Image: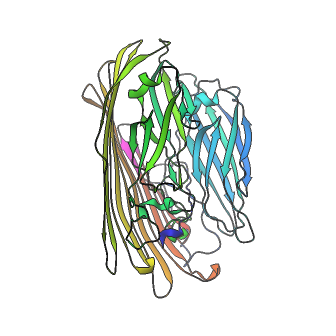
Amino acid sequence: MIGGLVLAAGTLLGAGPAGAAVRPAEPPAEFGTDWHDPVTATPPVAVPHTRSCQVTLAQAQFRDFTPYKGSYAPPKGCGDRWSKVVLRLDGNVKGRQYDRLGYLHVGGVEVLRTSTPEPSPDGIAWNVEKDVTRYSDTFRSAQPVEMLIGNVVDDTYTGVIDVKVTLTFYAAEGRVRPAAAPDRVLPLDGTALTTPRNSERIVAEVYATGSGGGCEEFWYLAVPDPAPYSCKAPAGPNREVRIKVDGQLAGIASPFPNVWTGGWSNPFLWYVVPAPHAFDVRPIEYDLTPYAALLNDGRAHQVEVSVAGVPEGQSGWSTPVNVLVWQDRGSEVVTGALTRHEESAPTGSTTYTPGTEPRLDARAGHRLTTAGYLDTSHGRVTTTVARAVAADTVHRWTEGENTDALKGSWTDDSAVTTDGRGPAVTARVHRTYTMDGITTIGADNRLRTVITLGDRADTATARGGRAASWSHLDDTYRGDAAWTLNVPRDQRHATGTSAERYRLYGSDGCYDRSLKTAQGTLTEDLRRC
């Protein structure tokens, strides 16, 4: 039943003083023809108080699958070494429409992957902000721009998606210094990559999304034969996003279990507060610095991304790649070697238990460690990258999938150690993604979904074995919504509550915001930091 998934999105609002709260009037008894504009508890992008210049990147109405194509020119009056660059998307849509997935490319570099909210008949507006300072190299010269939010408009699905995207550049002046952005940003065209010969740090980012309306859009529910379920895959729900350099595995990652705004057959869950990352899809990052010596030979090398667990020959994943490069300005050519490549055998299992409520237990795990050194203008630097991923899910359902439930946890742990430029520095990240949801259809034809989603991350940086910085992130969404199936839209009598709390605290400070909604009304907006 969860196969009714469509796509989703979220919005950023500015922070207010600690303890500030919004408490509107009592919500209606059920959803009407209009509701609050989408909002998320995600923190706004912090910006400096310096001169700023704004450029419009794209302005379009999306009715079909024709990309918007335009051009970009750098701003005048804010220099070319900025302290911050912020992308903002403003959108509006009304009528009836599915959620849609979209991308924005500047000079071939993917700077935003997003999806849209589903509209009310009366119309909604939303916005997304993103820190795109890391793409400063791309923004320093004129570039072609391409954007697409694929859409279908007809007599039934009437919503035209109207968007405007801007870039705001904040000057580096006074005590505000230019941001420490990569020297080069290289979009991966096909699988061939040629890097500058003096690269001393290389990071690939992959905007991996399962999408397109097929089963890979909700890959975490797939089951193998002989389990009787509508979405099948030999590996069940076990997925892993891998990157290879010249055929050798160079990075592994757990994909984030995105839920779009029609997800779990219940758009009433997401009309106001979407699932985490639905509007601003976060790229997976792979530190490829151990491979820099190999890549620095001036030749083209093969860099390939794949999603393990996808049935052979089946589409459904998009994996655009940007390669971020930091260069050694004191050397024309940086040499070195890959010195370590240790990979555990990937584990993956599925256990099917038949019965009146069939059950699939699935587990997976994998470890990879790579290391290499570079002889730079400031001495020999060794980089060691260790990563471990794991998944554990339990899927239960009934005949006809009138009950469909999943409880899952995915972990992605990484540690990057850089040794040779003063005390050794180790940056550790422990990520955990969780999903606990159930959809039921009662005898009265009422579909109800109750779900909790979690995105958590603990980071710690040590210098010379002593703690230097740390942070803890906990972004949790909870929702409970019901509506009547197989009746006209005005007879669905939909009800739904949702809540999100985003907490981020650590050595750099604290941010804590909570949102609550009922029947499309924002009932609480509370800030605690």
Q: Is residue 55 magenta?
A: no
- Judge from the rendering whether residue 256 lies leftward or rightward of residue 266; answer left or right: left
Q: Look at 48% across and 18% down and name the residue there.
A: 198
Q: Which residues are magenta?
A: 503-510
Location of residue 441 with respect to 523 vertically, above or below: below
Residue 280, position as x, y percentages in the image: 54, 49
Location of residue 157 with respect to 200 vertically, above or below: below
Of 508 and 152, which appears nearest the observer? Answer: 152
Location of residue 152 with respect to 105 vertically, above or below: below
- Quarter of the rendering containing residue 104: top right
- Quarter of the rendering containing residue 238: bottom left
Q: Is residue 507 magenta?
A: yes
Q: Main secondary structure of the magenta part?
A: strand
Residue 267, position as x, y percentages in the image: 55, 68
Using the rendered image of the protein, determine whether residue 529 is visible from the camera's viewpoint.
no
Using the rendered image of the protein, determine whether residue 520 is visible from the camera's viewpoint.
yes
- Judge from the rendering whether residue 444 lies leftward or rightward of residue 355; answer left or right: right
Of 229 and 439, which appears nearest the observer? Answer: 229
In the picture as drawn, the residue positioned furthest to the bottom comes out as 443
Q: Look at 36% across and 21% down and name the residue there.
A: 337
Of 28 and 220, which appears nearest the observer? Answer: 220
- Judge from the rendering whether residue 347 lies leftward or rightward of residue 172; answer left or right: left
- Quarter of the rendering containing residue 224: bottom left
Q: Look at 68% across and 70% down and name the residue there.
A: 121
